[in-house]
Image (cartoon, helix red, strand yellow):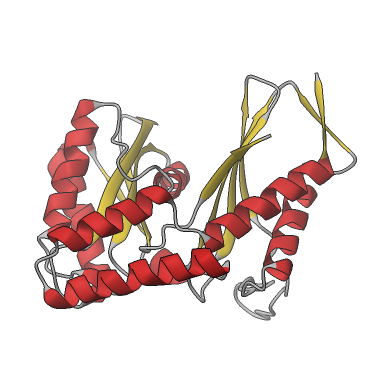
Amino acid sequence: MRELPASQISDAVKYLFLKANFHAGEDIMKALKNARNREISPTGKTVLSMIIENNEIASQEEIALCQDTGLAVVFAEIGQEVHITGGDFREAVNEGVRAAYSEGFLRKSAVDDPLFDRKNTKTNTPAIIYTDIVPGDGIAFTVTPKGFGSENMSALAMLTAADGPEGVVQFVVDTVIKAGPNPCPPSVIGVGIGGTADLAMVMAKKATTRTIDEQNRDSRYAALEREILEKINNSGIGPAGLGGTVTALAVNIEHFPTHIAGMPVAVNICCHAARHAQGVL
């Protein structure tokens, strides 16, 4: 059994949220530059150049990539041989989020009650935390500060087996086209297929944190990713919704076994910043 101080968890979460908000990943930057090279719209090229310049300045100056620094979402794979000491895991994560958003001068966007009071918590907490218990004696974190221009474009469809791959493709493409410029394209499209309605939505969000050039290991799903991406980029929405051939940088599908009577399909769209960071304790 390995003992892990709660304070170390807080420090790790703080570091990862600052990294995610200040530094676009190398894979994202490479994808944006490749997108600029192949974009045929002059306006689209200009938009992509501005995004790239913005990301470079943010990284150099260690300032936020975007004014919407998002709700704090944390995926944690906790080794079953870990014993957390000196505090509670959830509170340790929230302390890390509080520190990151305070010390990094990041906008606090969390409200305490979603419907009535809607008072800002002023700490960007509580974080949204998903945990999995896995073998081992470490904790692997994936954090993503989720902005709501893109989050508001999320969608869920309870399809059936009869809808088949064609139904999935149509639903995902229609969702992105309906979203238009709202999620700040070019986007990363996360898709969750299977499980239950709630699991499909979680899979879709986690799918947006995948490395840009990483395809699904199942060749059938990888082919579906490419087909959907091509159709989205043929929509003409383009960078910032101003027209062009690059509306999405990637389509990432995750899947899980489901009930014989259904086929949940969820879509979670991530803006061009695609903010996320990963680390292991």
Q: Is residue 205 above or below residue 259?
A: below
Residue 21 seen in this snapshot: yes
| Residue lying farthest to the front in this orientation | 60
245 and 37: which is toward the camera: 37
Task: Give the percent coordinates (x, y) of residue 21.
Answer: 55, 62
Look at 65% across and 79% down and name the residue there.
118
Residue 249 is drawn in which quadrant?
Answer: bottom left
Quarter of the image that includes the N terminus: top right
195 and 147: which is toward the camera: 147
Look at 13% across and 59% down and name the residue there.
38
Residue 49 is drawn in which quadrant?
Answer: bottom left
Look at 38% across and 31% down and name the residue there.
256
Q: Is residue 227 above or below residue 43?
A: above
95 and 173: which is toward the camera: 95
Residue 267 seen in this snapshot: no
Quarter of the image that includes the C terminus: top right
Look at 57% across and 70% down and name the residue there.
63
Task: Give the percent coordinates (x, y) of residue 213.
Answer: 30, 41
Looking at the image, residue 170 sits to the left or right of residue 4; the answer is: left
Task: Give the percent coordinates (x, y) of residue 269.
Answer: 36, 59
Q: Is residue 104 above or below residue 89?
A: below
Looking at the image, residue 66 sits to the left or right of residue 108; the answer is: left
Task: Give the percent coordinates (x, y) of residue 243.
Answer: 15, 74
